[in-house]
Amino acid sequence: MTLATAPGKAILLGEHAVVYGRPAIAVPVNEVCARAEVISLPGAAPGTIVVDAPDVGLAGELSGLDPGHPIPRILLDTLHALGPGLTPALTIRVTSSIPMASGMGSGAAVSVAIARALSQHLGLPLAPEQVSALAFAVERIHHGTPSGVDNTVVTYGLPVYFRRGEAPVPFEIAGRMHLVIGDTGIASSTAAAVGMVRERWRLDPQAYERYFDALGDLSDRALGLLESGRIAELGPLLDSAQDVLKQMGVSSPALDVLVSAARAAGAWGAKLSGAGMGGTMIALAAEPEVERVRQALLAAGAVLTIHTQVGK
């Protein structure tokens, strides 16, 4: 049996703007992950691949599944990348503890875990850049016009400074950053949110270019703070980003309530994370305030909270 995992992710700054060439910063969330187990299937004909993905209700032989579905797609693309050869009979079981449709990279993590597990089981492990590229291709099914940030941070499992079309820059945070993630429980469609922003940008390009510039500038400023360990100073940047994202129309009443609750409970800053219009938000807090912020989010209606620590 071969097991591979991939973490969830949170976008710290730069969502939506990253689609338009501005930088974004994303961090892994190791408290949740996708898991792919590849198990030999004795007695079955060579080339038989049985898929078992109970979280999404998908089960059956790969040859009989919809090739447009993300899980069969990443399996087929990985096999193609590995080149011709006789594949032994296998069962692939896929599970994930990452909330789906929440902006935490569930789809990218599943793809990365599958590509890793399958290639390792067949003795042909893929390089990280190959895994990331395969996951990015599948992200097009999930999101239409993905930025590439999800598959990048999930593959490398490190904080990443990312600009579309350029090599991702993994970096280290000096000190330890505590984030509390609050899930609204409202499904968030990245494709729908990105499409809405694109239409608004088309109708008012000057305003939206200003929004994107502002978000990109916040990402650049945040990188210096993180690398120098000035974590608390990041809080106002998160608050500023939330203001811009609200003006863009991608926040929601449920997200606004959670953001306000986190700030009132002592968070240094808080904002939505990901596509918005539902999904999750993040709050930056000092370690002694984490539990107070978490309880405030639950009292304000969060269906789930996750405390993640990033950095040394």
Image (cartoon, rainbow, N blue to C red):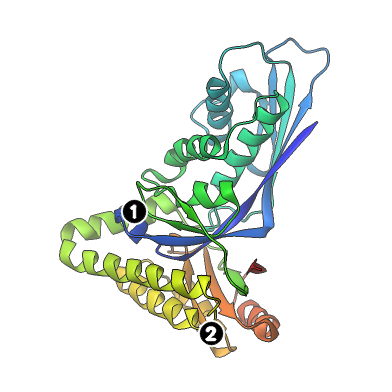
How many numbered badges does the structure rendering display?
Answer: 2
| Location of residue 212 with respect to 293 vertically, above or below | above
Instruction: Give me the residue at 60% from left, 81% from top.
Output: 285
Decide if residue 187 is on the left or right side of residue 93. left
What is the three-letter code of the residue carrying label 2?
Trp
Instruction: Give me the residue at 68% from left, 34% from top.
Output: 117
Q: Earlier in the sequence, mark 2 or mark 1?
A: 1
Q: Position of residue 32 (x, y in %)?
A: 68, 56
Mark 2 in CB contact with mark 1 (< 8 angstroms): no
Q: Position of residue 107 (x, y in %)?
A: 55, 45
Q: Secondary structure at mark 1?
A: helix
In the image, 76 versus 226, the foreground residue is 226
Instruction: Give me the residue at 62% from left, 60% from top.
Output: 29
Q: What distance separates the C-alpha of mark 2 from that of mark 1?
A: 27 Å
Quarter of the image for the N terminus: give it: top right
Q: Which residue is mark 1?
A: 19
Local crowd size for mark 1, using a 10 Å CA cut-off: few (<14), some (14–19), many (≥20): many
Q: Which residue is mark 2?
A: 268
In the image, 214 versus 169, the foreground residue is 169
Local crowd size for mark 2, using a 10 Å CA cut-off: few (<14), some (14–19), many (≥20): many
State the residue lying farthest toward the right: 42
The dot on residue 258 is none
What is the three-letter code of the residue carrying label 1?
Val
In the image, 241 versus 131, the foreground residue is 131
User: Which quarter of the figure has residue 264?
Assistant: bottom right
Q: Residue 204, can we see it?
A: no
In the image, 228 versus 197, the foreground residue is 228
